[in-house]
């Protein structure tokens, strides 16, 4: 059951953007892609072509990826932590847009939001080895010292699927160090642990 404060926040966002609905998932760090049908399901990706119906993801270090097809008028919100990134959830979302909505790759745009960047995301050797063994990332700088660059992994997935590089936009804001570097305060679980809130990234199609 959703808390009253959470539901109030959702209602505030819906009112702010004059939305008919705001879809979100019970995020489980998976590669599950769902078509939004008005219910809350387990998964880490929601897709919709309904007008004035937003789909969103919550995060506090994981990568939010927003996807939009300007011709078919379809959008998606992806929650891509290391597990989702490792299992190529963004690539699977692109596949869903092509298969379910007949989207053309040249019409798809990718927007990568604030997340813990390669500047700060220190990981263990096991994770470094997992990502380094993925052939898709061989030509990409995804590892520097003991830090993992999830953004580059996601860009590699998109380009491998045929997305135009000029259609991939990266906000390039690190949730861990953005306050010190640029004065922009963002929620970071690594920094604040249980005291951290969550950021909401959403996308919707206007009437």
Image: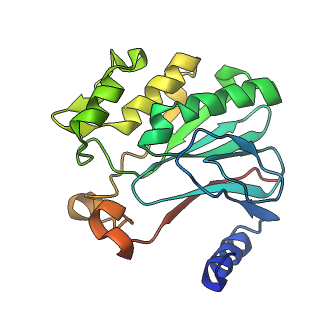
Most extreme residue toward the left is 145
Q: Residue at (28%, 65%) from the top-left corner?
A: 191
Instruction: Residue 139: give x, y in percent of width and height.
Output: 33, 15
Does 92 sit above or below residue 181? above
Which residue appears at 47% of the width and 36% of the height? 85
* Residue 47 x/y as whole percent: 73, 44
Q: Is residue 150 above or below residue 5?
A: above
Q: Nearer the viewer, residue 41 or 126?
A: 126
Where residue 205 appears, x then y in whole percent? 76, 50
The quarter of the picture where residue 136 lies is top left
Left or right: residue 17 compared with residue 91: right
Q: Nearer the viewer, residue 136 or 141?
A: 136
In the picture, measured across the screen, residue 18 lies left or right of residue 133, that is right
Above-or-below relation of 15 to 35: below
Residue closer to the observer: 63 or 111: 63
Quarter occupied by the N terminus = bottom right
Residue farthest to the bottom?
Answer: 4
Residue sitting at 60 percent across and 47 percent down? 44
């Amino acid at each position: 059951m959703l808390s009253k404060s959470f539901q109030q926040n959702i209602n505030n966002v819906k009112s702010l953007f004059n939305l008919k609905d705001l879809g979100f998932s019970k995020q489980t760090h998976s590669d599950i892609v769902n078509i939004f049908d008005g219910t809350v399901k387990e998964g880490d990706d929601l897709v919709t072509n309904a007008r004035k119906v937003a789909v969103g993801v919550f995060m506090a270090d994981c990568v939010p990826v927003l996807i939009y097809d300007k011709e078919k008028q379809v959008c998606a919100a992806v929650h891509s932590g290391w597990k989702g990134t490792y299992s190529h959830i963004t690539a699977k979302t692109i596949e869903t847009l092509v298969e379910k909505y007949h989207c053309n790759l040249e019409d798809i745009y990718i927007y990568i939001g604030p997340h813990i960047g390669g500047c700060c995301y220190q990981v263990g050797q096991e994770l470094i080895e997992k990502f380094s063994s993925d052939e898709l990332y061989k030509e990409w700088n995804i590892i520097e010292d003991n830090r993992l660059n999830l953004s580059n992994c996601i860009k590699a997935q998109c380009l491998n699927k045929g997305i135009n590089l000029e259609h991939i936009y990266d906000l390039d804001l690190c949730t861990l160090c953005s306050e010190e570097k640029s004065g922009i305060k963002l929620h970071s679980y690594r920094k604040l642990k249980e005291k951290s809130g969550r950021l909401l990234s959403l996308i919707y199609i206007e009437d």
